[in-house]
Image (cartoon, rainbow, N blue to C red):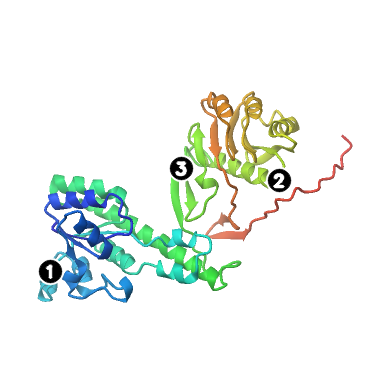
């Protein structure tokens, strides 16, 4: 590996990585703010302008979009291709290090304007990633700073990255650009009025959170994913307990959603996706006690959803029977100590209830989508039985 192009918005660990590349004999080429950061750190770096012979224009919108850059990235390292780019004074680029403008973070800010969002649509960076990913047989692409150490370790060991590493990093780059484009498409559809209900094309960008213990059955594998840019149950913090299964997550979701449809202190007990107890009361402990009375037999091994911070009295009551998991906005310290004494009890904390507006269910070859049924007003219930 002889030459690297660096163009990063997120400069985490950039300087240590660049120093490692220099120590390995790699020439640094960088754009804009990345080049300035490297030069200020005392590293020898060539700017993109030096390589292309063209200045940045349009306030930085055009920096790396030039044959001197993309010819160097896209050229196969074959005698014919290398001779062709050499005729045009272009040298190969062996490593591309690039991450993108923070589009999702920008549109998540309250009050962001369309103009502000548009300026955070990265063009040159996406093009760099796609070019390097396409030519990963010869070029290494790094989009995630957590991969810096892996690249340096392989360089120090062999002077180049391994084919399997290049393939893995290319896939990671394409995943990254796909999520990025999906976020842009969804945002612009909303701005154009096409995303109010059900757009003609639905882009769902998912980020893996973790593998599951198993799927619906022990012989099935599974994983949980989080919708990009969305906070919700998939982002809940696990405070205690073992890994979750597919059915565990379904039960926790049902318990959490049901508990949060009420304004007053509420406890919901779910067993195999079916409610076996539900109650509201003046206190959370009382609500749990009444929910348990609905069907104390089925509640054994169930999942509890609560819409208030768990206090000591509630924790003591729940700890009296075997429970698979509890999800709540929070846990008082003394309550947490009581519940953590149960080795396998999963505890999840999710401070804010922010349900997505749409819910999805897979069918063979497609997806059913509907508006989520959200009504936080306490329903007026009428007892029609005599008992």
Disc 3: CA contacts within 10 A as few (<14), some (14-19) or many (>=20): some
Residue 82: image location, x then y, percent:
12, 69
Res. 70 visible in picture: yes
Residue 201: image location, x then y, percent:
51, 68
Q: Which residue is mark 3?
A: 221
Depth check: 270 or 96 in front? 96
Q: Secondary structure at mark 3?
A: loop
Which of the two marks, 1 or 3, is nearer to us in this view? 1
In the picture, measured across the screen, residue 181 lies left or right of residue 170, that is: right
In the picture, measured across the screen, residue 26 lies left or right of residue 16, that is: left
Which residue does the image show at 45% across and 58% down from the upper left?
Answer: 105
Res 39 label: none
Depth check: 178 or 220 in front? 178
Which residue does the image show at 14% across and 53% down from the upper left?
Answer: 22
Residue 93 position by quadrant: bottom left
CA gap, disc 1 and disc 3: 46 Å
CA gap, disc 2 and disc 1: 67 Å
Residue 154: image location, x then y, percent:
19, 47
Depth check: 228 or 321 in front? 228
Q: Which residue is mark 1?
A: 82
On the rendered image, what quadrant is the C terminus found in? Answer: top right
On the rendered image, what quadrant is the N terminus found in? Answer: bottom left
- Location of residue 312 with respect to 76 vertically, above or below: above
Q: Earlier in the sequence, mark 1 or mark 3?
A: 1
Q: Earlier in the sequence, mark 2 or mark 1?
A: 1
Res 262 label: 2
Which of the two marks, 2 or 3, is nearer to us in this view? 2
Residue 228: image location, x then y, percent:
47, 55
Q: Secondary structure at mark 1?
A: helix
Q: Earlier in the sequence, mark 2 or mark 3?
A: 3
């Amino acid at each position: 590996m002889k030459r690297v192009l660096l163009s990063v918005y997120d400069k985490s660990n950039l300087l240590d990585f660049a120093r490692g590349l220099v120590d390995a004999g790699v020439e640094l080429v960088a754009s804009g703010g990345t080049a300035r950061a490297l030069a200020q750190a005392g590293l020898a770096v060539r700017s993109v302008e030096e390589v292309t012979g063209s200045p940045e224009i349009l306030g930085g919108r055009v920096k790396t979009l030039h044959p001197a850059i993309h010819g160097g990235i896209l050229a196969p390292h074959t005698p014919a291709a290398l001779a062709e780019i050499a005729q045009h004074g272009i040298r190969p680029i062996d490593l591309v290090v690039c991450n993108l403008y923070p589009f999702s973070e920008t549109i998540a800010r309250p009050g962001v304007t369309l103009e502000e969002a548009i300026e955070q649509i990265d063009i040159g960076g996406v093009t760099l990633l796609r070019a390097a990913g396409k030519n990963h047989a010869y070029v290494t692409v790094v989009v995630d700073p957590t991969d810096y150490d892996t690249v340096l370790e392989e360089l120090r060991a062999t002077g180049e990255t391994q084919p399997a590493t290049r393939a893995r990093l290319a896939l990671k780059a394409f995943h990254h650009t796909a999520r990025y484009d999906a976020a842009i498409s969804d945002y612009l559809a909303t701005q154009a009025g096409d995303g109010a209900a059900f757009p003609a094309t639905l882009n769902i960008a998912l980020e893996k959170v973790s593998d599951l213990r198993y799927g619906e059955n022990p012989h099935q594998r599974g994983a949980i994913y989080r919708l990009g840019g969305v906070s919700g149950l998939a982002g809940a913090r696990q405070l205690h307990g073992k890994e979750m299964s597919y059915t565990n997550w379904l039960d926790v979701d049902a318990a959490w959603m049901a508990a949060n449809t009420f304004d007053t202190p509420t406890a919901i007990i779910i067993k195999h996706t079916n409610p076996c107890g539900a109650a509201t009361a003046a206190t959370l402990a009382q609500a749990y006690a009444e929910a348990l009375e609905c069907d104390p037999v089925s509640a054994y091994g169930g999942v509890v959803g609560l819409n208030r911070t768990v206090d000591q009295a509630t924790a003591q009551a729940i700890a009296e029977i075997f429970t698979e998991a509890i999800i709540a906005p929070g846990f008082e310290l003394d309550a947490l100590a009581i519940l953590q004494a149960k080795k396998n009890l999963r505890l999840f904390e999710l401070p804010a209830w922010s349900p997505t507006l749409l819910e999805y269910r897979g069918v063979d070859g497609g997806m059913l989508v509907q508006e989520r049924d959200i009504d936080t007003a306490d329903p007026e219930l009428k007892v029609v039985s005599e008992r």
